[in-house]
Image (cartoon, coloured by chain):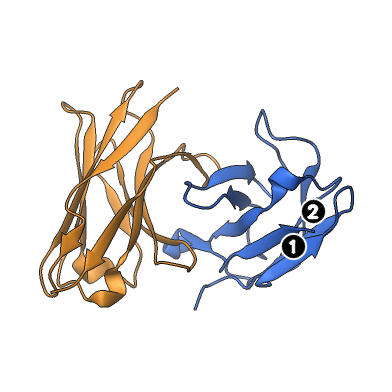
Chain colours: A orange, B blue
Amino acid sequence: QVQLQESGPGLVKPSETLSLTCTVSGGSISTYYWNWIRQPPGKGLEWIGYVYYSGGTNYNPSLKSRVTISIDTSKNQFSLNLSSVTAADTAVYYCARDRGDAYIFDQWGQGTLVTVSS
Amino acid sequence: QSALTQPPSVSGSPGQSVTISCTGTSSDVGGYNYVSWYQQHPGKAPKFMIYEVSKRPSGVPDRFSGSKSGNTASLTVSGLRAEDEADYYCSSYAGSTYVVFGGGTKLTVL
């Protein structure tokens, strides 16, 4: 059973860049689509984007100008960078696997809360 | 504001059935048979319960069923149990936007 684990700072200052890493264990990252999804406190889910194992990416149009997702297959990790953050970017950030066949997220990390505050 | 519209809350007594709706447009729910449903307990990551409108992954009880009519998808939970109390989110493939989610529905088992 593949497992995903998010890591990174829990506090980021406004206007700075939020950076998170997802480590995949129990399986290879060299297939499937690897996603970031966020959930502001008390609110719904928002898809941020994905990186394919080959390095191809796709981002939510509403965040595209600020998002970069990359992958390191040698470390079985993929990462999220979100620039110019504001308080509206405060959320629990999840990494998740998408098999690519039915647009579903079948494996999720536990999530990590990132707060944007000075 | 979420792309897909769900009722904020629904409730039912143990053993009863409840249905949660998810309304989108012809660009998402109505245009593709790629509607999924996720269950999320407090403090936990979402778990996918239904995919491709009505298919259940292994391990999901057959008390959970999905359907779609036009731009509205539905999740029905039959034979309600205490452990079904959770937030439920729908999602849909949306073409160039990839995937959009609903705002979530809190299911309360009375």
Residue B20 screen position, x and y as percent:
74, 62
Q: Which residue is mark 1?
A: B20
Residue A109 screen position, x and y as percent:
38, 40
Q: Residue A31 falls in which quadrant of the image?
A: top left
Residue A50 screen position, x and y as percent:
33, 50
Give, as a three-letter code, the residue at label 1. Ile
**Residue found at the very far front of the displayed protein:** B110
Crowding near pointer 2: few (<14 within 10 Å), some, many (20+)?
A: some
Counting labels gives 2
Q: Is residue B2 above or below residue B18?
A: below
Residue A60 screen position, x and y as percent:
35, 64
Q: Residue A22 falls in which quadrant of the image?
A: top left
Question: Residue under mark 2: which chain is it in?
Answer: B
Which residue occupies 14% across, 74% down? A14
Which of the marked residues, 2 or 1, is nearer the chain's N terminus? Answer: 1
Crowding near pointer 1: few (<14 within 10 Å), some, many (20+)?
A: many
Tell me the tag on residue A103. Answer: none
In the image, taking residue B52 as reference, residue A6 lies left or right, namely: left
**Residue found at the very far bottom of the displayed protein:** B1
Q: Is disc 1 placed on a helix, strand or loop?
A: strand
Do we see residue B69 in this rendering?
no
> Would you say the residues marked 2 and 1 are in contact, meaning their CB atoms lie under 8 Å apart?
yes
Which residue occupies 55% across, 43% down? B47
Q: Is disc 2 placed on a helix, strand or loop?
A: strand
Q: Is residue A21 above or below residue A44?
A: above
Q: Which residue is mark 2?
A: B76
Give, as a three-letter code, the residue at label 2. Thr
